[in-house]
Amino acid sequence: MIDSFSNTPEQIRDVINTHWLLLDNIEEQTLDFDEKTGELKEITSQYCSSSTERYIIINRKKQNNEYGNVFRHEYGHYIDDVIGNYSESAEYNQAFKLDKKNFDSTTNKGNANLKEMLNDLSENTAAFKSEYVSDILSALTINNTEVIEFYKENKMIYSYHNWEKYMLPMQEMKSETFADLFAIYTENNSDIISFMEKWFPNLTQEFQTSMDRAVQVDFVEKEVVKV
């Protein structure tokens, strides 16, 4: 976990240092009891929040870099939560809509943007390998077939969510994207960040705005309430 934050820029470090005390626990597990079926099932790494506590669960089977990658993402969900669910704010929602519209394959412009973005992605090894980037593409294109096939053709792993299984898929898309952006800026790979800021300017700018606001005293007092 320490290594996964070792290259974190000052902006993100300030946010972590401001809010880290509100995280109650980090649990490592392998199996969990399914109350519906009565069977043991493998743990899915996740961030959990209730009226009494906030904690992160990590699948103990994950190793080295994979563990760090998952932890950065789940910590992003935690930060989103403690700053008042910023991924549900009007500002973030507008940024998400604008960048999503840029890759609407039902329009000529959107289809052209999608093809150009994928071509650029194929020339950026770090971004192409990043599970955070593919997860964001999964949300913004709602698992567009062309995107999926592009990853397959290039023999790259496509990390994604099945949005149909969620009761509120759009809310989940925005939440997952926020956590991915937190992970990307925490990882601080310049190639990945340059790709993101080029193709998703509204989301990346709004995310950085949220990080600046997250350490402001008046914002913290109004939004961060530990119940």
Image (tube, rainbow, N blue to C red):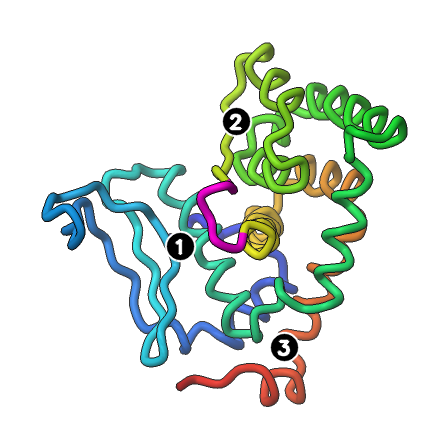
Q: Is residue 140 magenta?
A: no
Q: Nearer the viewer, residue 100 or 224?
A: 100
Q: Position of residue 70 (x, y in %)?
A: 41, 46
Residue type marked 2: Tyr
Residue at point 50% right, 69% down?
81
Q: Label 3: which residue?
A: 215
Q: Which residue does the numbered mark 2 point to in the structure image?
A: 158
Q: Nearer the viewer, residue 161 or 77?
A: 161
In the displayed structure, does residue 145 sit left or right of residue 74?
right
Number of the front mark, 3 or 2: 2
Furthest residue toward right: 109
Which residue is painted at 62% across and 22% down in the image?
145
The span from disc 3 to disc 1 (Cα, nearest Å) is 21 Å
Kind of element beneath mark 3: loop
Task: Pinpoint residue 52: horizontal percent, then vertical percent.
Answer: 32, 80
Mark 1 lies on a secondary structure that is loop
In the image, residue 203 lies at what x, y percent?
A: 73, 52
Disc 3/disc 2 C-alpha distance (Å) = 34 Å
Tag 2 secondary structure: loop
Q: Are marks 3 and 2 in contact (CB under 8 Å)?
A: no
Q: Nearer the viewer, mark 2 or mark 1?
A: 2
Q: Is residue 192 above or below residue 225?
A: above
Q: Which residue is mark 1?
A: 2
Looking at the image, is mark 3 or mark 2 earlier in the sequence? Answer: 2
